[in-house]
Image (cartoon, helix red, strand yellow):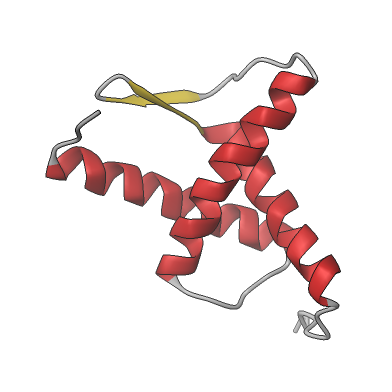
Amino acid sequence: MSLSLVELLVLLLIAAVVGAIGREIAGSTRGGLVTSIVVGFIGALIGPWIAGQLHLGEPLMVRIDGHPFPILWSIVGAALFVALIHLISGSRYRRRWA
């Protein structure tokens, strides 16, 4: 498995967007670009696994050099991961809506 530099950058960009959306859904504003990328990749592992267990399809799949990246379930997985982290850590941080 080898990716060119451009393909890697596109994959990182997609993971960052997916992670940022997942973090926003779960209500987390802490962290930056690297945190969003990590959350996006973890979501790409958790979300499709959950969808597979429930026998659900992926309506939005992006392929980068033949490597699939499930967008919708990655967002769901990222949001669930962030929510679980908040639950486990007992985070006292709460978003204040202005």
- Outermost residue toward the front? 1
Quadrant position of the C terminus in the picture? bottom right
Q: Is residue 61 left or right of residue 95?
A: left
Up the image or down, 52 lies above or below 17; here it is above
Quarter of the figure with residue 37: bottom left
Quadrant position of the N terminus in the picture? top left
Q: Is residue 57 left or right of residue 86?
A: left
Up the image or down, 76 lies above or below 24; here it is above
**Place of residue 85 in the rendered image (x, y in percent of width and height, measured from the top left):** 74, 65
Q: Residue at x 59, y 45 (%)?
A: 43
Q: Is residue 42 left or right of residue 89?
A: left
Quarter of the figure with residue 54: top right
Q: Residue at x 76, y 79 (%)?
A: 95
Up the image or down, 49 lies above or below 83; here it is above
Up the image or down, 89 lies above or below 2; here it is below
**Place of residue 52 in the rendered image (x, y in percent of width and height, measured from the top left):** 70, 20
Q: Is residue 71 left or right of residue 52?
A: left
**Place of residue 44 in the rendered image (x, y in percent of width and height, measured from the top left):** 55, 39
Q: Residue at x 53, y 24 (%)?
A: 60
Number of numbered tags placed on the structure image: 0
Front-lying residue, 72 or 90: 90
Quarter of the figure with residue 67: top left
**Place of residue 66 in the rendered image (x, y in percent of width and height, measured from the top left):** 30, 19
Q: Residue at x 48, y 23 (%)?
A: 61
Front-lying residue, 80 or 71: 80
